[in-house]
Image: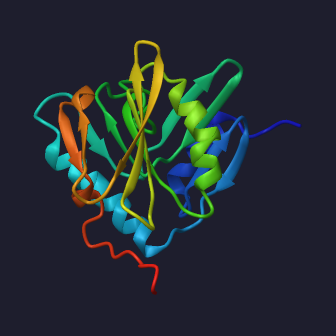
Amino acid sequence: MVGVSVENYLSAELDSPVKHEYIDGVVYAMSGGRNVHGTISSNITIALGSRLPEGPCQAMNSDVKIRIRLPGHTRFYYPDASVICRPNPQDDLYQDQPALVAEVLSDSSRRTDQHEKKEAYLSMPSLDLYLLVETDAPVVVVYRRTESGFLREEWQGLDAVIPMAEVSMELPLSEIYRRVSFKTDSE
């Protein structure tokens, strides 16, 4: 089966009212998320943008595609937020060297974000931090690059602050979950 070429995908995305992810020639429409997903995603982008120091790194929202190249494979994903410190100088249609990627978990994306996307993102030499952000509790799982691979960390509670020396900042969970209400066991 012959799939969609990268060039055709990128061209079609320019005019498409719906975002699509691309995996090895197959194009998948992205579904809309719940309000809490949008709130958390926006909060992450705002917090990253306001806390990043002056310099080469810039926060990006979910409109920016990330290209991932693996041996014999090409993927384009739209993460919920990212930090780019080395912009793609050849093409304004995507980025391919993120330092940080954040995905907000939902029922429909959880398995993909925790497995396929995680493995793809962690294969990128530029990536230092991969954040998986829960929507029903203040919990963020961070995969942090170390000399021996990626270390999994879990940050819980609105008082927690994620140190991110890799991009010269800290990220408080209180900012990620600003204006988000959580259900209690009695609800």
Question: Between 19 and 147, which is closer to the camera in this rendering?
Answer: 147
Q: Quadrant of residue 41?
A: bottom left
User: Which residue: 55% across, 50% down?
Assistant: 13
Residue 46 versus residue 154 in the image, above or below: below
**In-image side of 8 versus 136 (left or right):** right
Q: Position of residue 55 (x, y in %)?
A: 14, 29
Q: Residue at x 64, y 51 (%)?
A: 111
- Residue at figure coordinates x 36%, y 35% from the top left: 100
Quadrant of image for the N terminus: top right
Position of 8 compared to 25: left or right? Answer: left
Does the image show residue 67? Answer: yes
x then y, percent, for residue 127: 41, 27
Q: Is residue 12 visible?
A: no
Question: Is residue 167 positioned above or below 79 on the image?
Answer: above
Q: Nearer the viewer, residue 131 or 99?
A: 131
Outermost residue toward the left in this view: 54
